[in-house]
Image: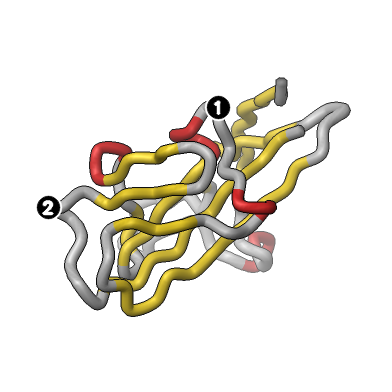
């Protein structure tokens, strides 16, 4: 199982030493930005990322052919990502039927939609 480590880092402009730390009106502005970055370490496992495009689809049923036609079977919310016309669908907008079928909800799909599916396999 992968190990997840969350770290907080301090991000500064590349020319930080040359940037004045004031707002120009007597106030003080900070050039520091704190961001959260999730580092993922997968120890002793192989990680494979597959994707498949379904262009100008008329059917709401997508048949996955990558990875020998097998979608991940566990942790589906993290392992499979479905996009319709560039927008990520939420889990209630599609159903996965193993080993290789993704059915888009009737209220979400419309003829002519373009889909791209990403599948992440951790072995």
Residue 106: give x, y in percent of width and height.
15, 52
Residue 53: give x, y in percent of width and height.
48, 69
Towards the viewer: 68 or 7: 68
Kind of element beneath mark 1: loop
Q: Quadrant of the N terminus?
A: top right
Q: Quadrant of residue 74?
A: top right
**Circle 2 is placed at which residue position?**
107
Does the image show residue 35? Answer: no
Q: Give the crowd class for mark 2: few <14, some 14-19, many >=20 residues within 10 Å.
A: few
**Above or below: residue 52 compared with residue 30:** below
Towards the viewer: 60 or 115: 60
Towards the viewer: 26 or 85: 85
**Circle 1 is placed at which residue position?**
74
Residue 40: give x, y in percent of width and height.
69, 34
Q: Residue at x 39, y 76 (%)?
A: 55
Q: Quadrant of residue 10?
A: top right
Kind of element beneath mark 2: loop
């Amino acid at each position: 199982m992968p190990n997840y480590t969350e770290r907080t880092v301090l991000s500064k402009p590349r020319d930080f030493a040359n940037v004045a730390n004031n707002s120009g009106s007597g106030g003080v502005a900070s050039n520091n930005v704190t961001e959260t970055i999730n580092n993922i370490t997968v120890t002793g496992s192989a990680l494979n990322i597959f994707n498949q495009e379904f262009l100008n689809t008329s059917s709401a049923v997508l048949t996955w052919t990558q990875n020998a036609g097998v979608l991940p079977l566990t942790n589906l919310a993290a392992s499979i990502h479905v996009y319709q016309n560039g927008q990520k669908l939420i889990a209630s907008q599609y159903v996965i039927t193993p080993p290789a079928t993704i059915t888009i909800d009737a209220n979400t799909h419309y003829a002519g939609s373009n889909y791209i599916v990403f599948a992440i396999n951790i072995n």
